[in-house]
Image (spheres, rainbow, N blue to C red):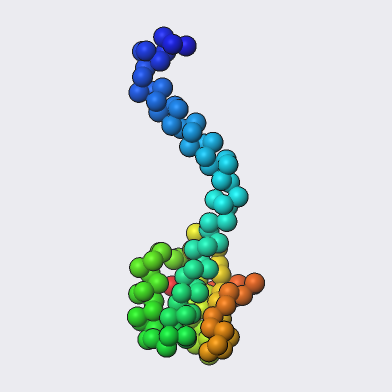
């Protein structure tokens, strides 16, 4: 075994790094599995707060949210003050409740209309 290490030191270091990263991913697998849901939720809640709590213009809020994290789908339902965003395959919806409560994430995401970006 030590002959392999002496002949291929860079391969050995690379192998150790890969094994360490795999072990780290395994230990944090629950957190890594939850990550895709965070992208859509953060985007929907941030936009909803910017638009309906802070009462900013739609264009400003959309550009503000896109600076944080890129999203693949987005829909602002102005009539119901509800925002739906999709990121990394997970769709989340936030809705304005009241001036005192602000925006809250809904347990069930609304459907994104076809072609909504």
Q: Is residue 67 left or right of residue 112?
A: left
In this view, 43 is above or below 13? below
**Residue 34: where, in percent of width, then height?**
57, 56
**Residue 54: where, in percent of width, then height?**
43, 85
100 or 91, nearer to the observer: 100
Residue at the extreme front of the image, as rendered = 100
**Residue 52: where, in percent of width, then height?**
47, 86
Image quarter of the C terminus: bottom left
Q: Is residue 42 visible?
A: yes
69 or 97, nearer to the observer: 97
Residue at 43% over, 81% down: 50
**Residue 10: where, in percent of width, then height?**
35, 23
Residue at 41% over, 22% down: 12
Q: Is residue 89 visible?
A: no
Counting the numbered discs, the total is 0
Residue at the extreme top of the image, as rendered = 3
In this view, 45 is above or below 57? above
Residue at the extreme right of the image, as rendered = 107
Q: Is residue 15 left or right of residue 90?
A: left
Residue at 47% over, 11% down: 1
Residue at 49% over, 33% down: 20
């Amino acid at each position: 075994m030590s002959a392999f290490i002496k002949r291929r030191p860079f391969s050995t270091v690379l192998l150790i790094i890969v094994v360490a990263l795999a072990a780290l991913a395994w230990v944090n697998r629950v957190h890594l599995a939850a990550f895709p849901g965070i992208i859509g939720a953060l985007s929907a809640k941030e936009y909803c707060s910017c638009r309906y709590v802070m009462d900013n213009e739609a264009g400003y809020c959309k550009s503000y949210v896109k600076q944080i994290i890129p999203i693949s789908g987005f829909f602002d339902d102005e009539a119901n003050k509800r925002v739906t965003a999709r990121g990394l395959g997970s769709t989340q919806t936030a809705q304005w409740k009241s001036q005192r409560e602000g925006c809250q994430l809904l347990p069930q995401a609304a459907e994104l209309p076809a072609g909504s970006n």
